[in-house]
Each structure stands twice: as C-alpha cells, then as structure tokens.
Image (tube, grey):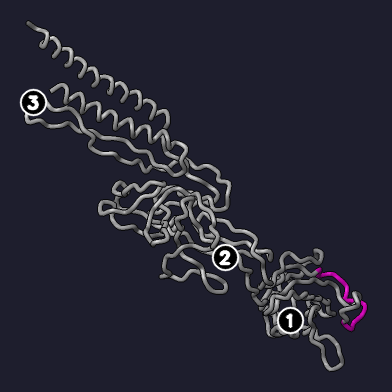
Amino acid sequence: MSFIQGINGINSAAQALDVIGNNIANSQTIGFKSSYVSFSDIFSGSMVGLGSQLSNVTQNFASGSMVTGSKNLDMAISGNGFFRLSDSGGKIYFTRNGEFKLNSHRQIVNLQNKFLTGYQARGNPPSIDSGSSIENIIIPSTSMNPVVSTEGEIHGNLKSDVDVPKNSIFNIKNPKSYNFTTQLEAYDSLGKKHVIKIFFVKQEAQGNWMVHGYDETSPIVDDSKNIKTNPILISFDENGNLKKSENSNKYISIDGSSLDGSDPLKVEINLEEMTQYSSDNQINYQKINGHGVGKFNDYNVSDSGKIIANYSNGQTQLIAQIAMANFTNNLGLTPNGENCWLESAESGPAIIGLSETGSFGRISGQKLESSNVDISNELVKMMTQQSNYQSNAQTIKTQDQLLQILVNMK
C-alpha cells in the first residue's frame, strides 16, 4: 500500500502548495482573503490507512490592514460586511475590494465593471426615504438647485456707552445718522444673491436702539421713492440682555421686490442673541439661510458610507448611501474570482445594512483594505509542505527499492 499512501500524500502536499502559491500570488491584491487547507486520513478498512486527502479549503475573512487610496472612490470596510455588486444581468456579487470608478454613465463600478449598489438620494434637497429600494449608484453632475432665503440671525454686541447719532433723522446714505451697520447675503427663488443691510441707531432712552434693514439689491420703495427700512425698536435690560417684552422686538423683517421674475424676497432676522455691553460694536456670528445655484465640483465618501457632492456655492449635498451585506456564515460563501463571492445555502441569504449600524463595520473613504496574506507565515507553510512532498516521494522510492530487491531474488 505504500505506493498509494505516498501518492495520496504527494497529492495532498501539492494541493496545499497550490493554495499557498495562490495566497502568495495575491499578497498585493486589494481585499483578497487568504485560504488554508485541512486534511483528513483515508480509511482503508484495516488498521493501516491509505494516506491523506484534502478535506477542505477554508478562507480567512479577517480584515486586512488599511492603506491610503489615491481616488475619491477608493474605499475600505473595517470590520464585518461586504460591498454589494450587481452585473448587467442583475446577478448579485459580494466583495471586499473597494477599488471603484465611474463609467461613462456616471455609475459607480469596480474594475471589472460590476455596479456598486446602494440607496440613491432624491428630492430637493435630496434625501433617502426609509424603505427605498437598492439600486445601482449614480453620481450626477447636475447643478444644485437654489434654496430661497427665509430666515437668519445675528449675534453680536452694541456698545452701551456710545453717543446718540448727531443726525436724528435716519438716512442709509449718512453714516452720522446711525452707530453701527452690517450686511448679510440672501438668495431669492431663482438663486440670485441679494445684499441685506442692517443699521443700528442708539436712542436717547437707556438701552433702546432702533434697527433698520433693507434689501440693497432689490429694495422696496414708497410712493415718494424712499427706500423702506422696516425699523423696529429693541431694548436691553440692566444686564445687557435683550428684553423679551411686547415693547421690544427680536425680529426684523426684510422685504425685497421681485428681481428678474423671482418671487419677492422676505427674510426674518432674529436678533435675540444681541447684547449691549461696554465693549465695542461687533458681530460675532451672522447667517441667512438659503443658497444660490451651485455647479458640481467633486464628491467624497464619508465614514458612514454616504456619498457627498460638493458644489461651487460652498454647499454639500447627499447623493447616495452605500449598502453593505453580511452573512450568518461567511465561510459558506462561494468564491467566484475577481475578488467576488456568491451567496449559497451554507452562507445563508445576505443581510443588508449600512455602515456602522448593528453588526456592520465601517466604510472609510479614500482608504483601501490590503490583502490579509501573511507572507512570512506562507513561506513557512511552503517549506513545511515542500518537506512533506519530499517525504511522501521518499516513501514511494523506498517501496520501489524493496520491490526491486524482491524481483531480483533468485
């Protein structure tokens, strides 16, 4: 039986070397998962078996180390989960290789042109509705629609010991008729930028200020062609805080006329964070909501697996959310080549989720997961299997020598 035992042993060692060689060959393959072999003995019905046989090739799904990617669509998963891909026929694949690119239709595909799937954001502003279906992700290059301004706020201080203006009649063109001014930007329904000017005028009564405001870009004028500034009175208490009473307002309304066919602008600006201390007049923060049209600049992948577009107006916008898949038994997945696996009865159906939710790992943008092959370990295993191969070959050689002795006996 030594011939059979030796041959089976050689076959086992050769198969182990095949697996080791494949591991070493893919040591630089992004997202590759190494494999290892298991052997079992061959029962012959007697006390002496017939050698060994390959029992199983098992994949090691431990995470590889993270390396910095060079493209916006490079991404990696740390922890549990797979990217979910589909081909043109709708067949579903799973991978850990995060090397993606855009095709001519601006769909995200891997290097083998399989589509990355997820949830596409829709609406204005775009959002992802619960219960949305999974589809191939597209990154559109269209411009961002404008959002009309409706409200704003100003935080700052008005100097408490400043003198009342010399000119008691307010005039937007006369700096001697007001103490302090600031300006903000607002946007109409067509995305046109409007300059909003605010003026603060100290009153004779302690703690009282008049606040005027108007749309400099498209002002509203009265019958005498005077610009309407919608003045309001604000009052501060002995601690320098804005009074909240019927006699003291905290909002100033800014109205603008229609410009180039837009809706008339109307913005409410909140002043309740204003103070009156002895320090200088200053603005700490001011902002009006809304924005103009934005041209598409670029995009990036966040650590939550969201694809965010960046626009020329300084705004960002959600484009899509990458879907992740996980399995009850990763070891039951069927390798399909090109760094992809297929689900099987042993793996169970794919469980769909999102980055950093439940048992799912985290998607990191501009990162790649390197192969988890340990070269040092593979070289040691290769030397061990080489020795095993030689030892089994030696048993065949020894059996052959014994047979030659018997044949030559007279």
Residue at the spot of label 1: 254
**Amino acid identity at mark 3:** Met
Q: Dot 1 lies on which element?
A: strand
Residue 140, label in figure: 2
In the displayed orientation, state which residue is furthest to the top.
410
Q: Residues within 10 Å of mark 2 (few under 14, many from 20)?
A: few
**Which of 61 and 228 lies nearest the eye of the viewer?**
61
Q: How far from the left and from the top, in percent, is residue 406?
A: 10, 11
Question: Going by the image, does 36 lie left or right of 406?
Answer: right
Q: Residues within 10 Å of mark 1 (few under 14, many from 20)?
A: many
**Quarter of the image where one finds residue 197:** bottom right
**Which of 136 and 359 lies nearest the eye of the viewer?**
136
Q: How far from the left and from the top, in percent, is residue 403?
A: 13, 14
Query: Which residues, given as a range, are shown in magenta?
Result: 159-170
Question: Going by the image, does 238 lie left or right of 321?
Answer: right
Q: Nearer the viewer, mark 3 or mark 1?
A: 3
The N terminus is located in which quarter?
top left
